[in-house]
Image (cartoon, coloured by chain):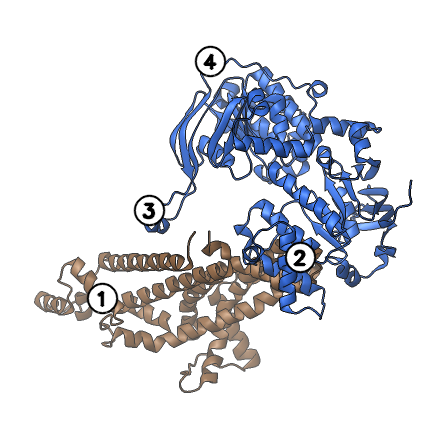
Amino acid sequence: MQSKAGYLTGKLIELILTLLLVSLLVFTAFSIIPGDTARVMLGPQASESQVDLLRAQLGLDKPLPVRYGEWLWGLLSFNPGTSYAYNMSVSELIGQRLPVTLGMSAIAMVMVIIISYPLAILSARKPGRLGDQICSVIGHVLFAIPPYVASLLLILLASSLFSLLTVGTYVKPSDDFLGYVGCLLLPSFAIALPKIAMSFKFLRSSIIEQRNADYVRTSKSHGLSDLKILVRHVLPNSNVSSITIISIILSDILGGSLIVEQVFNLPGLGRLLLSAISRRDFPLLSGIVFYLALITVLLYFISDIASSLADPRIRLK
Amino acid sequence: MAHHIHIVKVHHLTLSFPTRKDPNPKPVLDDVDFGIRDGEILGLIGNSGSGKTMTSLAIAGLLPESASIVSGSIKFAGKNLLEMNPKERRAMLGKDIGMIFQEPSTALDPLMTCGKQLEEVLTAHKDSSMTPEDRHKTIISMLGTVGFATPEEICGRYPHQLSGGQRQRVLIAGAALLKPRLLICDEPTSSLDTVTTVSILGLLKDLCHKLHITILFISHDLSAVRGFCDRVMVMKDGKIIDKDTTSDILNNPKNTYTAELLTNARLDTRILGFEPATVDYSRSPVLTANGITAGYGRSLFERVKTKSADNNILHDVSLEVFPNEILGLIGSSGCGKTTLIRSLLGLLPHSGIVNIKSSSIGAIFQDPVSCLNPAHTIKWHMAEALKASDKLKAFAGSGTRAERNSRILARITAVLEECGLGAEYLLRHPKELSGGQRQRVAIAMCLIQEPSLIIADEPFSSLDASSSAELLKLMTDINRERHTAFLLITHNIHIVRQICPRVLVMDNGRICEEGTTSDVLNDPKSDCTSRLLEAERQIHGV
């Protein structure tokens, strides 16, 4: 029999191996793309010797394995070097932008959960009825709208009709927390819309499936009320499969926010990433990509642990 | 006859499933009229689709929403159940009427410990005098009553940590916890092996006497009621067509349909006409397996952690199947029968040698419902099976595409007909077929590949007695006419006795006994065979 600690250790080793693989992929990808960073930085007029000098300064003349080792150590000690373009520490740059991206993702996730759960439960009560069908149709439409289109529509709506929410300005959370949340509401909603539809569809079918399970019949024969059966049996069982979906949605939201930032003119990681790509700013670029990958892998790790807590069959096979 | 107090009186009950298209469909229950006497065990027997389960659900008040009661009444201890509101009926469930169902493996919530699930029965019927300690005591004592030696331990276990028989005991404990007056058992033993079945039936009988619980016992197997039920009713097409004491029904059936059910249940060879082929043991076997050892995979980290642990389910199993032979393989659940099949079919990595003489080997499985693709027609299934074998070219021959297709179609039709399914089944979908018909399709899919061996893994266990008897006849016909060998895995020793010349007995992943059927079953050498035979004797009285 497998112990809880054994399961955790196994998952941790998996996590570390995944991260190493990710780091190797990121490093190789950036090493084989054509283009000379030093040349780009100095411009076409610079002489060959100047370029060589800069290359040595940046450590680009060392052999690849050494560079990989140094880069990886930098990442792990949260000091991935200095950005070529901004001339600032990469961790400081990311630290500045992270609250925007993370805040937006968190708000979007909360929206997904508080909207899709109640709707799914209501819809699954009487599948096939009018309310359920209307929800399903709206869900399909929402699912088909990409976040950047939704962003544009929302900007139009908010600025022309309501003029309630500020668009295009960013307030730091340290200055005014409510203002910070306020300016992230619309972009978060734009990201959340298709995910709400996705999570609604999934939850609905999973609840319907669980409602027809044999143990629900047993509970009925024990005289339990419908509400008790829903809360104590149906929802926990449908949660087991939803946890995985929720973690996939969350990592999708992180990725989706990079584009929406662009539309809403928010100083988040997405815009930093774009500028890093156009300027061949390797330390910054690899730092952002690696840390985003780290967050994603951690999310999956947490969701695995959460699944094992929710389902005794996973931890004790 | 003395006057009996009826605890349940079903009075001219008619029930149907009206739809918008068809507001007056053929009733599922047609003028059902019977009473359950206080303290008796009443058997309700019938083939699948005869309306047994609907009758029980109507009494319990758990009918699906689409069902509508056209006329009649159900009285429980003098109260008319159909006049009660849903809340009052729910209050009766668990308290006055308990239920247990067919499939214990899925009837418990996998995320909740058994103790918690039993506690829900008590908390659902709010009894303010009960403290949590009282509840725990009640549960522990009931778990003891249903035969658990260590009830405390069972309380803390999750359903997946219990065997099928243990789960059924937990479910019985839940149903009997509040000492209901009526316990409805809907095929409680049909997915359990013979040894477990005997112990569960013994337990139910015990509960009936000790706690004075009246039992309505539903089954499709007429032979299972022997020595268990006081009276038996036989149902067919929504009507009760026969009602008598158990001994009269079994020994002296007055109704022709009851007699037919009885013949099927007993698998009377002379009446049903099973004629398996004779086997020549001097010929070389079609399948030879030598020293098979197999188990289920562990993940990489588990393997690193525990290198030496023996996870194997099969230990050094060797067997031979000869041409024309129907080889029986029996054993209680969990002994490794299914793992052996998976190894033989190459579905599971294993060590040891499997030698198959012919090009193809067919397999049919336990559950005909999920074995067929619901999206496709029978014709598609047959064509797929033909494509998968190397026989396609041989049958299609040369010529234009249309010519080849018509030859393939003719071949498919011929095989289906051989399996007792006419051409009208070609375009049907699996959901339009009964369990027995689906199992026929599974056999036809094997036959079209012309295998020299078909492995059948408990093909009868989800079929009622009549379908089983028909399927068995088909198998023996194929065996006789096509000289196809069968490896038949079953927990029904009676079937083995009737059609298998040779039998293997498995226990704990090893073959513990092997020999001709008469030798093994009349003079068992090993403990596990004796155990199986003893259970068989108790159920069927053979």
Residue ID for mark 4: B283
* C-alpha distance separating marks 1 and 4: 71 Å
Q: Residue at x 59, y 26 (%)?
A: B444
Q: Chain of mark 2?
A: A
Q: CA distance from mark 3 to mark 4?
A: 43 Å
Residue under circle 3?
B307
Q: Is residue A32 above or below residue B223?
A: below
Label whose residue precedes the other's in the sequence (3 or 4): 4
* x then y, percent, for residue A158: 53, 77
Residue drawn at (43%, 68%) of the image? A257
> Does residue B230 appear left or right of residue A28 in this picture?
right
Indicate the position of residue A65 as horizontal and vertical percent values: 18, 58
Q: Nearer the viewer, residue B350 or A100?
A: B350
Image position, residue B152 (x, y; %): 56, 58
Q: What tint does the image give chain A?
A: brown
For label 2, count other residues whose C-alpha is less than 10 Å away and answer few (under 14), some (14-19) or many (20+): many
Amino acid marked by disc 3:
Lys
The residue beneath circle 2 is A219
Q: CA distance from mark 3 to mark 1?
A: 34 Å
Q: Which chain is blue?
A: B
Viewer-nearest of discs 1 and 4 = 4
Residue to which mark 1 is pinned: A73
